[in-house]
Amino acid sequence: MKEKRLTALITGANKGIGFSVAEELLRLGYYVYLGARDKVKGQAAINTLKAKGFSKVSLLSIDVADPVSVWKAAAWLAGKEDHLDVLVNNAAIGGRRPQKASSGDVAILKEVFDTNFFGAIEVTRAFLLLMRRSEAPRIVNVSSELSSLWFQERDTSSFYATELMAYSASKTALNSFTLMLAKELQHTEFKVNSVTPGFTATDLTDHSGHQTPEEAARIVVKFATLSQEGPSGQFFGSKGRIPW
C-alpha cells in the first residue's frame, strides 16, 4: 500500500513566522501549501523556498477575511489532495492604533476580529472535511501571550493595557475557539491547541521583537507535529503551558 504523504497548510505564510513554519515543515518532509492573500508575494515566497532546494511546496491563494476566498481555496485543495494533516491558522493583523477599551474605533475592532478570529474559524471549518481524512490531524492556532487574561491581569505595561485591546481580545476569542473545538473533537484523532510564538521581529511588531521568526516557528512546528500522546485543548508558549 502506498504511504500517504504528509500535508500541511499555513495561512499568512509568505513572510515572518508563517514562512519559517513552512520552511521547517518542508525540512520534516511535509508537502506544504503556503497560504497567502497576495499572489505576487506568495509566489515570491515559493520561489525563495525552491531556491533553497525545497520542491514540495505550492501556493494557495486565500484571504482568510473573505469567506468566498476561503471556501474557494478549500475546494481547490480538495481537488489536489485527499486529506490534510496539519492546519496552522497563522494569518493575523495587529490593527490600527490606538485601541483603547474606552474610546477605540469599533471599526478597528471589527477589522481585527475579521482576520484573527472569524477568519480562523472560517478556514478551520472549510478544511475540516479534508482533515477528517487524516490519520493524525493537527490544528495549531497561533495566538499571543497578550490573549491570556491571566497575563494581562499581572502585566504592568501600560502599552499592552491601553494600545492593543482589539488585537488582544481577538486572540482571547481565538483561544476560546481552540478550547471549544478541542472539546468537540476530543474523541477523535484531532489535536487542537493554541500557541504563542513570543515577541518576534516581524512586520506585525515593526521588527522590534527579541527573537527571529525561525526561533518563533519552533513552538508552532512542535504542536503541528504532536504525537498521539500529546495534549489537546491547551495553550502553550516556549516555556510550557500558559493559563487562559
Image (cartoon, helix red, strand yellow):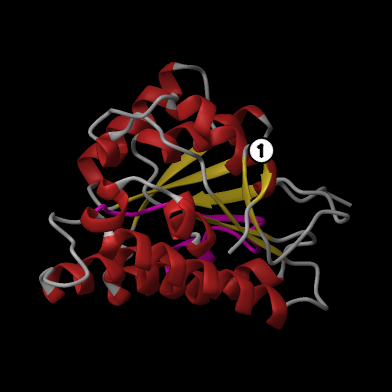
- Residue at figure coordinates x 36%, y 67% from the top left: 169
User: Does residue 192 lie above or below 26 as drawn?
Assistant: below
Residue 219 x/y as whole percent: 61, 39
Residue 207 x/y as whole percent: 27, 28
User: Does residue 43 lie above or below 106 as drawn?
Assistant: above
Name the quadrant of the C terminus: bottom right
Q: How many numbered circles are shown?
A: 1
6 relative to 17 in the view: left or right: right
Q: Is residue 88 magenta?
A: yes
Query: Magenta part of the protein: which range?
Result: 75-94
Q: Is residue 69 among what the camera can see?
A: yes
Q: Residue furthest bottom?
A: 184
Q: Is residue 49 magenta?
A: no
User: Does residue 88 lie above or below 46 as drawn?
Assistant: below
Q: Is residue 89 among what the camera can see?
A: no
Q: Badge 1 is on which residue?
A: 239
Residue 96 x/y as whole percent: 13, 55
Residue 124 x/y as whole percent: 51, 70
Kind of residue at badge 1: Lys
